[in-house]
Amino acid sequence: MQASKGPGKTALLSWIAWNFLATRPYPKIAATSITADTLADTLWTEMAKWQTKSPFLMAAFEWQKTRIFCREHPETWWMSARSWSKTADANQQANTLAGLHADYILFLLDEVGGIPDAVMAAAEAALSSCVEGHLIIAGNPTHLSGPLYRAATTERRLWHVTEITSDPDDPRRSPRVSIQWAREQIEKYGRDNPYVLINIFGKFPPSSLNVLIGPDEVKECFCRYYREADVAGSPRVLGVDVARDGGDASVIAKRQGLQVFPLRKFRNIDGIQGAGLVAREWQDWNAQACFIDMTGGFGASWFDQLRTLGRSPVSVLFSAAAVQSERYYNKRTEMYFECIEWIKRGGALPESPEIMGALTQTEYYFKGDRLILEPKELIKQKLGYSPDEMDAIVMTFAAPVSPPAPAHRARQLHFAATDWKPFD
């Protein structure tokens, strides 16, 4: 089942499992999912739910935390929940389903989009010597590799593939998913957005979409520049990325509307020096807000010193929950994607090889059904430097900021030139 979000695929898997347990002699069923927690919270809970609706199932079978078995034949008639540790290697993952043999055998792999290939191979091997065997996989098309992707593409002739969509304009859509919700997501993000493709249409995203943005679009934003009058009504926002070690740099970014101004970059400065530089920039530029990266606690001294100077900065954790938590896995991912949307609306960035590298080399993937960026450590290894400039820029998208209050022009019109006091 290559499915959109919410059609009830886990319920169907539980029906199949109960049917197999109830109608085959001495069956063995193994169930797994992307993580042990996911399996416990979804399929295993669903098994308990549907058992309570049947007096026969309640009388004939016993449900336990990781095992369901026939009360009359507990050792030879059962279903088990299988998982692997987060640090497991390929061999340990393969052992999750290895060694199962029976005349009647069933494997259920839920949320299979991110399940390792080694697990799948072990399940396929067990089908070689059974009287009746089935391998059923279900998930959202979040990965362009792995068991679900192969079953739906290169190995499609070997599978019975059921595509489940929530497309509000498709007559075969899943009736379980709200049409209103589906239309809202399409209107909000667009039909070509990877989030919509996966969660609404049940389609794999194009492979070209695994990077944040292409180099041509970044070059275009380097060529744009807005005059002060063009962005005058927009709030002035500071973003501060604090260096984590001697090899990184602390960066202050200034953004007003569609314009990011030249960055200020410093190395080997302490919290007192950094806070002084931010406070001066804040005052001279008359900014409406300042966001400071507090990930790992490196920005704490900057934050505290600014508070001492009478300022009210806003702390941001890259690992914190996103505002749009149904779409983004963490705050870092949300801010980067907000910046990408801003660039596509006409945003202007100062030309920089570091910005070009950070935008065109950073990849994203799906964790469950939410977007997440690859870890910053991997980006540093790939680029050979830390994307400090880009981190400071995306900090300006941490939260909405109110525009400045309109100037009182009437008062200025009543002053004569002789009343002007240049030192006031």
Image: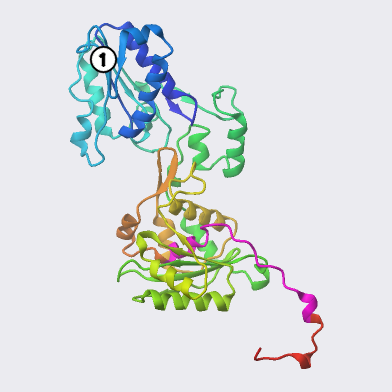
The kind of residue on which mark 1 rests is: Trp
Residue 235 x/y as whole percent: 61, 65
| The quarter of the displayed image where residue 69 is located | top left
- Taking the spot 40% from the left edge, 54% from the top edge, the residue there is 362
Q: Secondary structure at mark 1?
A: strand
Residue 110 x/y as whole percent: 36, 27
Location of mark 1 (residue)? 78
Quadrant assignment for the C terminus: bottom right
- Taking the spot 22% from the left edge, 29% from the top edge, the residue there is 96
Q: Is 216 positioned to the left or the right of 15 in the image?
A: right
Work out which residue is located at the far bottom of the displayed protein and give it.
418
Can residue 160 be seen here? The reply is no
Residue 253 x/y as whole percent: 49, 69
Q: Residues within 10 Å of mark 1 (few under 14, many from 20)?
A: many
**Considering only vertical position in the picture, is 152 above or below 402?**
above
Colour setting: rainbow
The magenta stretch is 389-412
Given residues 110 and 118, the one toward you in this image is 110
Can residue 307 be seen here? The reply is yes
Residue 203 x/y as whole percent: 48, 33
Q: Is 405 positioned to the left or the right of 20 in the image?
A: right
Given residues 245 and 143, the one toward you in this image is 245
**Considering only vertical position in the picture, is 384 above or below 23?**
below
Quadrant assignment for the N terminus: top left
